[in-house]
Amino acid sequence: MVPRAIKDDIYWVGFIDWDRRLFDSLIPTPHGTTYNSYLIKGSEKTMLIDTSDFGKENNLLAAIEMTGIDKIDYIVSNHAEQDHSGSLPKILEMYPDAKIITNSKCKELLESFLPIPKEKFIVVNDNEEISLGNKTIQFMIAPWVHWPDTMFSYLKEDKILFSCDFLGSHYATSELFVSDEKEVYLSAKRYYAEIMMPFRTMIKKHLERIEKLNVDIVAPSHGPLYDKPSFIIEAYKDWSGDSVKNQVVIPYVSMHGSTKAMVDYLSESLSNKGIEVKLFNLEIADAGELLMALVDTATIVVGASTMLVGPHPLAYYATYLVNAVRPKARFVSIIGSYGWGGNAVEVLKGLIPNLKVELIEPVYIKGYPKESDFKALENLAEQIYNKHAQLGL
Ligand code: FEO
């Protein structure tokens, strides 16, 4: 990749991964991603901020070389995850005098993933600064966006915040800065839903801290940079805030149409009451789309057939995933159908200990829904409507 100048003596030396279509072996990345690394040349010292994924070493080395900078004194590791540290051993080999600047937690993780000698590390604490001569980097320990090791680096003179995974997006683009806010908004929301949503409380604290800084540019580890940072800061405030939408998300799986008939009936009842409904047929759903819908929704209703004696594995998987990302939804219910018996409802209820929700009585029936079952679904829709109304939705 050709390096790009962000400002005088500050370069993006990242890699645009146009072809990546899955992250964490879990979430589709329809727009690819980037692994952003940054090179800062001070009057006395030179610093590389983060490296790249495994296999991208030569691209990173070539980009550094093209800047004309032939010496690296410091390599900052803001986060040990391998998409940012995988190239670190090779960079150290090529720049043997460079020291790794990181925090103690990140050092511990790096040492567990990569063969790095202890003497290579300089460990920094929160708010510690390192001078490059005419440029000063302040380090800000910012745990849990994405791992407990995460750290931000703030270039004070140029007002650039290197925010690591935080505020990023899986969005491959040749543009250095965000040019299409609508496109990037959706990619950033998808990214937030998978990576950041479980850590809403920490996110709010980090946002407050960032707002006290004077930031002209946010330079994340994935996706384009923000030269109008308020765009992404306001989006994160909205997503991580406590308000929810008058919306019901229904991930469902139906083996022979009974659960589907229930889902359709409930969906129509809710729509008739003015509630937005988002259905996700788990046979074909994009997990990223489902997680994005969970960012704002007030209610989640899982639609699950019984397979043998338990919930269908797709419903089990989706419920497990919902629990893992800890959406701010307020209400949950379960609907579905069984053949001869089983304990699907009890199993699914046991899968959501992380959610701070009120469980609305499930509607779980034998066979195809009858008149009385549709009435029960109508009642469920009514309960959801009333609960949303109580929230002022
Ligand atoms: Fe992009 Fe948590 O690594």
Image (spheres, rainbow, N blue to C red):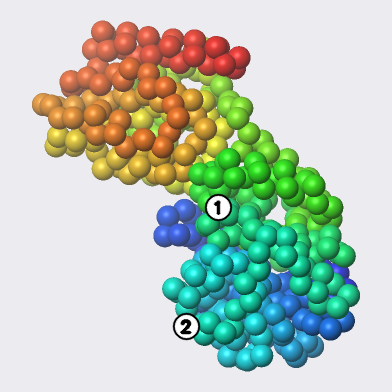
Disc 1 marks a residue whose amino acid type is Trp
Q: Would you identify the image quadrant in which residue 36 lies?
A: bottom right
Provide the residue designation for mark 1.
144
How crowded pointer 1 is (Cα within 10 Å; few <14, some 14-19, many 20+) is rated as many
Disc 2 marks a residue whose amino acid type is Pro
Query: Is residue 150 shown left or right of residue 154?
Result: left
Whole-percent x, y for residue 315 in the image: 31, 38
User: Would you place residue 295 above or below residue 392 in this image?
Assistant: below
Q: Quadrant of the N terminus?
A: bottom right
Q: Is mark 1 on a helix, strand or loop?
A: loop
Q: Would you identify the image quadrant in which residue 317 lies?
A: top left
* Labels 1 and 2 touching (C-beta < 8 A): no
Residue under the image location 56 percent in, 67 percent down: 104
Q: Residue 115 carries which label?
A: 2
Residue under the image location 73 percent in, 47 percent down: 209
Is residue 145 or residue 362 the one in the foreground? Answer: 145
Residue under the image location 45 percent in, 30 percent down: 356
Q: Gap in Å between the C-alphas at discs 1 and 2?
A: 24 Å
User: Would you place residue 84 above or below residue 362 in this image?
Assistant: below
